Amino acid sequence: MSIIEQKSDGIISRAVREKASDIHIVPANSSSLIQLRIGHQLVTLEKIKISDAQKLISHYKFRSKMDIGERRRPQNGSLNMVVKDEQINLRISTLPTTPHESLSIRILPQNEILTIDQLSLFKKHCVQLRTLMKKAYGLLLISGPTSSGKTTTIYSLLFNEFSRNRRIITIEDPIEKKTDSFIQVEINEKAGLTYAEALKAALRHDPDIIMIGEIRDAQTARIAIRAAMTGHLVISTIHANHSEGCISRLREFGCAQLDIKETLIGLVSQRLVNLACPYCGIKCSGYCGLYSTNRRLAVYEILEGNSLQDILANKLKKAKYEKLPQLVNKAIALGYVKETEYERWLR
């Protein structure tokens, strides 16, 4: 094994060991940085020569079947690895920058399946989410910033429903967690397999639940609503800052108010918050950071039932549900998280 191969595998092993979600190789004029995203913190692992960084990037590009010679446009690829008996999927992306190429790697563990009880900070949200998933039909939307755990939440809920013998089809771009438990479809727009086309085809395969990776255009939104109207439970993500914002997004996509009212069963907005360490105080030691588990949990703003219907009917004052600022403040008051979490997410 060459020095570059050893170096590349060592970086990935270190990132997995420290529970990093991303690896970045960042170019500068005189050197390059290797950084890890651990929790919400960007940690510099080391500084290396530009020539070594370019060799590393070329090696990752080669292993993920990218064009090594192409440095003028962004490229995307993927790579599967086994790190200490754990199956890992790596999503690798390059970006042409001045003066050199930059590379980012998203780490997606494949073996780990967390229950919703292991994900949620407040246990009452687990009950609410599982109750929504028991519905025979309807549209459930989950929103939140990038890397806030939306897909992890959805997979957790889907695995719970699979244990109840429900037929599940997922439509994703790309598939984040490969499993034999569901029928999984990966979008390939070059081949004409868009979200809309895949969703239309999935309806003919007798699904109980359809998961759409993201509602990103008007056609997908309309077909998702149609699927919910015809007796399917549809769960998807959508870009919105809070639960009520999901309704505005559907309207922007041209969905009729009556259709929205008839199909929506729940709106969820989530944030991943860093837990306060009960032992280390302000900042964890390296040992604690390396071996502790569940350093982040999700807070869910859930809009459902009568409160959802009140919002849809523009009875805003009548709608009563706990919003994200209230939930994060409650977590701070109970000592679960630090005040900085409120400032980071909600100010």
Image (cartoon, rainbow, N blue to C red):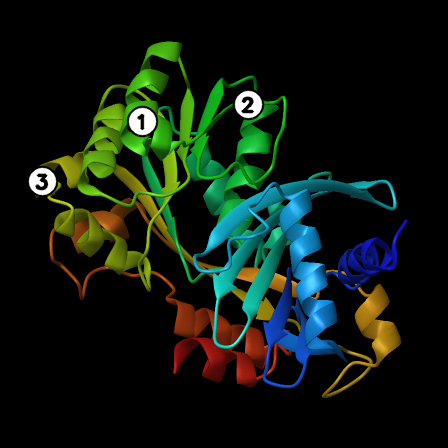
Q: Which residue is mark 3?
A: 256
| 131 over 12 or under it: above or below | above
The residue under the point 31% across, 27% down is 192
* Residue mark closest to the camera, 3 vs 1: 1
Q: Is residue 65 left or right of residue 109?
A: left
**Residue 5, percent across and down?**
82, 53
- Tell me which amino acid carries mark 2: Phe
| 220 over 108 or under it: above or below | above
- Tell me which amino acid carries mark 3: Ala
> Tag 2, which secondary structure?
loop
Q: Which residue is mark 1?
A: 192
| 167 over 234 or under it: above or below | above
Count of picture labels: 3
Counting residues from the start of the chain, the first of labels 2 and 1 encountered is 2
The residue under the point 37% across, 66% down is 323
The residue under the point 53% across, 79% down is 341
Q: Is residue 147 visible?
A: no
Q: CA distance from mark 2 to mark 1?
A: 23 Å
Counting residues from the start of the chain, the first of labels 3 and 1 encountered is 1
The residue under the point 59% across, 32% down is 160
Q: Which residue is mark 2?
A: 182
**Front in this rendered view, residue 6 or 170:** 6
- Tell me which amino acid carries mark 1: Gly
> Tag 3, which secondary structure?
loop
Q: CA distance from mark 3 to mark 2?
A: 31 Å
